[in-house]
């Protein structure tokens, strides 16, 4: 029994530390995103050759523009979600487990669908090609990659939407479980709903992008506040001895 409690405490600690790292990543994403695009996704390179040139000029920016930072953030979030699941395992195991599974599925889809590294490799091949025919072939492969999934496209919708939906479900579990405060639970519930709405608008109604960004800003701030509050609680759960 004591070993089990120690394991739970370790999980809470890892989850809390992971949340701090994720929050730092989100802040970094917000800063870089405001500098690079100013919130305007259409300002990103639109063709494969434009992407290749971006990689040539600044490969870090090229990877960022294709959501590699979001992939890293998503992976690091897994211990946080798992810690929240463990906290609710006894009180609401069904919904908590479902939320964890949906988050893991969404993260897997997001990782497998991300094209940052394959496009980086294609860019190197493009500039090392010795003939126009080879360059045209590589550019066509790049266009195929972009059609598979770039930010705001149908190809990445599930990868973005499913983890966000699972976070809404996690907030619902928090409301019922009463381990986290009501304020924490409702902040997460509202914030993640706003982010899900942003994802839907950007994907299916690109003409409403400015409205979507206005929705995403409060949504993102609420989700960050949610993460800060549940991170603090995870640290407190780490110290509980019974």
Image: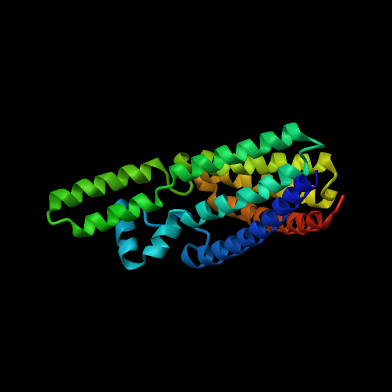
Q: Is residue 232 above or below residue 157?
A: below
Chosen colour scheme: rainbow
Quarter holding the N terminus?
Answer: top right
Q: Residue 178: where, in percent of width, then height? A: 85, 44
Looking at this view, is 150 or 169 the one in front? Answer: 169
Q: Is residue 205 among the parts visible in the rendering?
A: no
Q: Residue 29: where, in percent of width, then height? A: 54, 62
* 240 on left or right of 4: right
x 82%, y 52%: residue: 183
x 81%, y 42%: residue: 175
Looking at this view, is 240 or 18 the one in front? Answer: 240
Q: Residue 52: where, in percent of width, then height? A: 30, 58
Residue at the far left: name it: 131
Count of marks, rendered view = 0
Residue at the far top: name it: 94
x 79%, y 43%: residue: 174
Residue at the far right: name it: 242
Q: Is residue 35 among the parts visible in the rendering?
A: yes
x 13%, y 57%: residue: 130
Quadrant of res 51: bottom left
Q: Residue 212: where, in percent of width, then height? A: 59, 50
């Amino acid at each position: 029994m004591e070993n089990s409690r120690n394991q739970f405490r370790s999980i809470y600690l890892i989850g809390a530390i992971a949340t701090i790292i994720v929050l730092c990543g989100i802040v970094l994403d917000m800063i870089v995103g405001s500098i690079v695009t100013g919130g305007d996704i259409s300002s990103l390179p639109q063709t494969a050759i434009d992407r290749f040139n971006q990689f040539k000029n600044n490969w870090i920016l090229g990877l960022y523009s294709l959501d590699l930072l979001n992939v890293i953030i998503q992976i690091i979030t897994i211990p946080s979600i798992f810690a929240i699941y463990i906290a609710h395992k006894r009180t609401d195991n069904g919904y908590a487990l479902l939320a964890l599974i949906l988050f893991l599925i969404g993260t897997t889809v997001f990782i497998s669908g991300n094209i940052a590294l394959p496009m980086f490799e294609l860019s190197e091949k493009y500039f090392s090609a010795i003939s126009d025919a080879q360059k045209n072939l590589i550019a066509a492969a790049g266009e195929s990659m972009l059609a598979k999934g770039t930010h705001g496209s149908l190809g990445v919708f599930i990868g973005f939407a499913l983890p966000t939906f699972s976070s809404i479900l996690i907030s619902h579990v928090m409301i019922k479980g009463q381990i986290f405060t009501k304020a924490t639970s409702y902040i997460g519930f509202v914030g993640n709903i706003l982010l899900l709405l942003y994802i839907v608008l950007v994907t299916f109604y690109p003409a409403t992008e400015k409205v979507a960004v206005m929705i995403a800003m409060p949504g993102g701030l609420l989700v960050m506040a949610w993460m800060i509050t549940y991170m603090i609680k995870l640290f407190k759960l780490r110290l509980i001895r019974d």
